Amino acid sequence: MVALVAPAAAQAEAATDPAPEAGIVLPAISVSALERMVLQDRVIAGGLVGAVEQVLVQPLIEGQPIETLEAEVGDYVEAGQVLARLSLTTLELQRSQLLASLASASAG
């Protein structure tokens, strides 16, 4: 019983002692008057931005040569933006051949 009473008495004595122990430094506390103000939500930061994913861009018609490029490496592009224009020469030649074949089949 004596062993249990001694620690309890020491805790009760420490709780009633308002003086801090030697070597303990209490934090400084500053008080400011309350005032209403508008806060700006702004962060200034530096860094590098890179692509999360690289996408291979190719025409839907295989073998179709590119006539002009409308965007260069490093340009900002948006969905639906024209990146390149394909040459119509190959398509016009194929169309002429198909029309000639159709005319030949219709005549014969």
Image: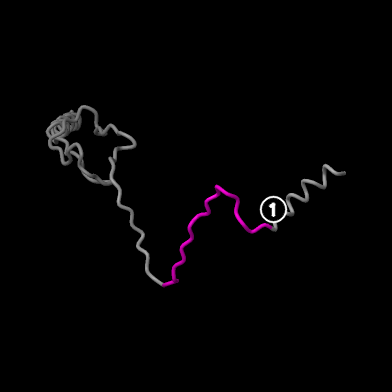
Residue nearest the viewer, comparing 39 with 12: 12
Q: Residue at x 37, y 68 (%)?
A: 38
From the image, which quarter does the N terminus lie in?
Answer: top right
Q: Is residue 16 rendered to the left or right of residue 58?
A: right
Q: Is residue 29 rendered to the left or right of residue 86?
A: right
Q: Name the spot of residue 8 as percent of width and height, x first.
A: 78, 49
Locate residue 90: give its quadrant. top left
Residue 92 versus residue 32 in the image, above or below: above
Residue 92 versus residue 42 in the image, above or below: above
| Helix, strand or loop under label 1 | helix
Residue nearest the viewer, comparing 28 with 102: 28
Q: What's under tag 1, amino acid-wise? A: Ala
Task: Inspect the magenta stretch and tell me whether residue 31 lies in it.
Answer: yes
- Magenta residues, start to end: 17-35
Q: Residue at x 24, y 44 (%)?
A: 77
Task: Identify the residue under disc 1.
Answer: 14
Locate residue 108: give its quadrant. top left
Q: Is residue 52 rendered to the left or right of residue 67?
A: right
Q: Name the spot of residue 94 as percent of width and height, x first.
A: 17, 31
Q: Name the spot of residue 40 as percent of width and height, x first.
A: 35, 62
Task: Inspect the magenta stretch and tell me whether residue 37 lies in it.
Answer: no
Can see residue 103?
no
